[in-house]
Amino acid sequence: MEILVPSVLFLLGLVIIIKGGDFFVDAAVWIAKVTGVPNILIGATIVSLATTLPEVFVSTIATINGSPEMAIGNAVGSTICNIGLILAISVIFMSGNIDKKSFRSKGLLMLGSTLLLFFFSRDNVLSAYEGGVLLLLLVFYIVLNIYEAKVSRNTFREVATTVQAKEKLDIKVTIINISKFVVGSIFIIVGAKLLVNNGQILARLLNVPEQIISLTLIALGTSLPELVTAINAIIKKEHGISIGNIIGANILNITMILGNCSIISPNGLIIKTRDINIFGNVFKNIPQTLYIDIPVTLVLMILIVVPGAVFGKIKKANGVLLLGIYIAYIAFLALITF
């Protein structure tokens, strides 16, 4: 009986988040068509901001509660999950051409912000000043998106007219799609919270170590909105929404979440060290985030930014490679944890 309630709530969260993702992608695609803005731009801004809210919530609360290391782990872990699992699945099942120019600017910004995070973290602390620099990158990202939206203005009237002619755009249609967007966002957030909370309870009831939960379940749970959005984008064949959402979410994870949390935390975000045991060999005081997590993040980013920026396409083989690295990373975390 003890396991029944969290199991039901976990399944309820899954249903809610799936339906929310369906509403969300429908509304995002409609916004892209009406405004004439490319899908990848919509995905990198509106969609990514909404789907990143669980990470924002978890990291901010963790910092306020005096656990800044959880803020870093959640943001970096979610970024790894976004690329190694979610983007990999998207590419494997729906590879195709992407808007190379838009992808290049955002992909390089994502990679650059992570390199900057690695540089700032070398002393095992992300100070408020360094967090401020990351927030400036966030401002630059917003300005970049505004600029790209203005560049797309030439197609606005043509596309909007086409939509009005084909879909009979009116106030009713607008209200329906805006409602879908809002309701979808709420469903995604509530569903993710149900999944994470009850997933943790189930893990404890099944005697899964707390450390494994924090390394995997929380990062995966807060990335579920991106996963559901990607799955719905695959079903609806909206490749740009999925890719743009992942890139945008990762930029927000690094710049907005870590920048904000480093300022909130009185002493900045401290990267704690730990003893790592690998096949009986114990390595003392290792900053895992600096030596393992961020480097893995950078490798994954390079594997998508280079082909996307140079060729305007990420092939299925890249997706398989990304997924393989993610699985190896999770297996390694399990190895050094037990």
Image (tube, helix red, strand yellow):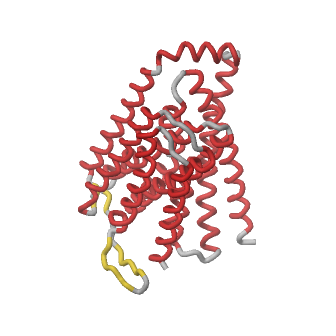
Q: Residue at x 65, y 30 (%)?
A: 179
Residue at the bottom extreme, as displayed: 280
Q: Nearer the viewer, residue 199 or 321?
A: 321
Q: Residue at x 71, y 54 (%)?
A: 12
Location of residue 222 in the rendering, given as x and y in whole percent from the top left corner: 54, 54
Q: Nearer the viewer, residue 334 or 258?
A: 334
Which quadrant of the structure image shows residue 206?
bottom right
* Left or right: where 281 falls relative to 230: left
Q: Quadrant of the N terminus?
A: bottom right
Q: Residue at x 58, y 47 (%)?
A: 90
Residue 218 vertical placement versus 247 (above, below): below
Q: Nearer the viewer, residue 182 or 304?
A: 304
Location of residue 45 in the rendering, given as x and y in whole percent from the top left corner: 48, 35
Which quadrant of the structure image shows residue 143?
top left
Location of residue 11 in the rendering, given as x and y in whole percent from the top left corner: 71, 57
Number of callouts in the render?
0
Q: Is residue 147 visible?
A: yes
Q: Is residue 66 visible?
A: no
Which quadrant of the structure image shows residue 203?
bottom right
Location of residue 51 in the rendering, given as x and y in whole percent from the top left corner: 54, 44
